[in-house]
Amino acid sequence: IVQMLASLVKHRNSLLVFAGVLLIGTIGIIDFLTGHDISFSVFYVLPISLITWHPSRNVGFVASIASALVWLGADLGTGVTYTNTIIPIWNAFIRLSFFVIITLLLTSLHHANTELESRIQQRTMELKKSNFDLQQAYKETIEGWSRALELRDKETEGHSQRVTEMTVRLAKVAGMSNDELIYVRYGALLHDIGKMGIQDDILLQKRRMPRPVVGDEFV
């Protein structure tokens, strides 16, 4: 079934042309059987549109000519008489002109639609790239802050990374999604961000203390 569907997709244009030709012939037969009094000209637009939109404009022109000729054959086949022999040819020419105009309009519309889809895809790719670049910049900024914290306090070097790895593992066990894990990781990296606002003489004072601070010395 998959191979059959793939084959149909591969030969889609050929199948559409065949379906359009078959539809033109069917409409011509119905046009002939219903006689001259009932006009089926507008129904020829359906196969013309089908062929023009998918395969190509040139094939649409061929379908327009075929539809005009089929209509002319059905009209003459009914045995109707005209006051002048050029009248049915003129009518066929008018219908052919109408079909050609439809083909040109559909071609322009299809071209505009294709161009719009291409622009949307291009814009979507640009937005995805911009979003990726923004996320990378955000990630690098947070990691830069984390490294800056460790540079201020060498004794805690690697602490933020160890806390981050442990926090992410716990978050995975808790069943958090990948999107949530990203923010958990950022939060863990910055859990000591408050150190950035603490003066060095306070943050690093333990290095100058000969003994632990006890009792009233805290005050």
Image (cartoon, grey):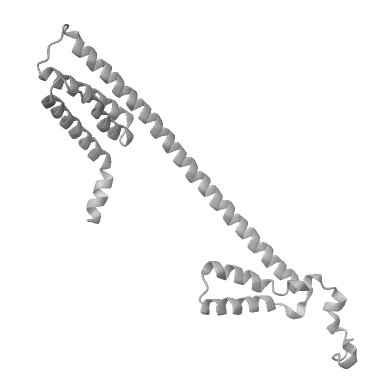
Q: Residue furthest front?
A: 37
Residue under the image location 14 percent in, 29 percent down = 30
Q: Quadrant of the C terminus?
A: bottom right
Is 114 above or below relative to 124? above
Q: Residue furthest top?
A: 84
152 or 131: nearer the viewer: 131
Q: Position of residue 106 (x, y in %)?
A: 36, 30
Q: Position of residue 34 (x, y in %)?
A: 13, 26
1 or 44: nearer the viewer: 44
Residue under the image location 68 percent in, 76 percent down = 160
* Quarter of image, res 191: bottom right
Q: Position of residue 101 (x, y in %)?
A: 34, 23
Q: Position of residue 179 (x, y in %)?
A: 54, 66
* Quarter of image, res 86: top left
Residue under the image location 29 percent in, 29 percent down = 60
Is 50 displayed left or right of 182 in the figure?
left
